[in-house]
Image (cartoon, grey):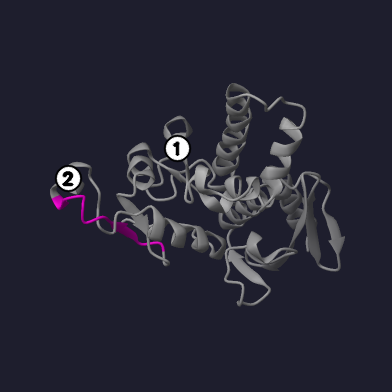
Amino acid sequence: MTPLERTRLEKAAADCGFELSPELVEKRLVFRSAQFPESVTVEPLGSDDFALQASEPMLLPVPEEAADVFRVHGWNVLYEVLDKAAATARTMPNRVAQKFHQATATLPKSTEAERLVVQRVGQNLFRTALLDYWQGRCCVTGLAVPELLRASHIKPWAQCDSDEERLDVFNGLLLAPHLDALFDGGWMTFAPDGAALWSAALPPESRDILGLASSRALHGLQAQHRPYLAFHRSQVFRG
């Protein structure tokens, strides 16, 4: 690793959310953050190629059964992967629920109005987590105007069995407003591979008016999303 490569990698770590000073282990740099315990190791291979490993496999965009080392080419791609890894680490299952319990521990919950205040705290944390996880983009259209995006539960809030389910980032999709309304109302859902499924109750001409292409798909689908999507298909979707 050349001094220039190390300097650029240390900057990439800081820019992407791994703000602690990287540790050099043999020919690799270990990226860490004070915000989460997970780490990512990066080894430069020359010609702008890099080998990445993560302490938690879900931080990198590879199937669980794939090889432990994930290779990328180019600094822009490296930044994208590191950005997503840090966002995933910040929003790991139960991490948002822990923030919620800390934020509401001293709030009264005896009246309906007080419970609504507590619920609003949870919904705000959930939206913030989804904006972070999906990096401020609709996971179907790519719309990148955060003010317009909706934090949509896959398994509805009222039907969740615990705060951990309600606030699980994998129980949420960041959607453009029209897709959020369709998904929330059961007019659309997603297949296990992420392909959009449209309810027969929504006529094709209505889909055309809404500009809904049949080829729409959910990007960035992870294994942790699938149980929630299965619930949505069986309990919410107007199949």
Q: Residues within 10 Å of mark 1 (few under 14, many from 20)?
A: many
Q: Which residues are magenta?
A: 194-204
Q: Is residue 3 left or right of residue 233?
A: right
Q: Residue at x 43, y 44 (%)?
A: 138
In the rendered image, which quarter contains the N terminus? Answer: bottom right
Mark number, residue 150 = 1
Q: Is residue 103 left or right of residue 208?
A: right
Q: Is residue 78 left or right of residue 196?
A: right
Q: Residue at x 57, y 27 (%)?
A: 116
Q: Secondary structure at mark 1?
A: strand
Q: Secondary structure at mark 2?
A: helix
- The residue under label 2 is which amino acid type? Ser
Q: Residue at x 55, y 49 (%)?
A: 160
Q: Quadrant of residue 122?
A: top right
In the rendered image, which quarter contains the C terminus? Answer: bottom left
Q: Residue at x 73, y 43 (%)?
A: 98
Q: CA distance from mark 2 to mark 1?
A: 22 Å
Q: Residues within 10 Å of mark 2 (few under 14, many from 20)?
A: few
Main SS type for the magenta part? loop
Q: Earlier in the sequence, mark 2 or mark 1?
A: 1
Residue 198 is situated, as x and y percent measured from the top left of the image, at 27, 56
Magenta region includes residue 148: no
**Number of marks in the rendered image:** 2
- The residue under label 1 is which amino acid type? Arg
In the image, residue 190 sits, relative to residue 123, either above or below, namely below
In the image, residue 143 sits, relative to residue 233, either above or below, namely above
Magenta region includes residue 196: yes
The residue indicated by pointer 2 is: 206
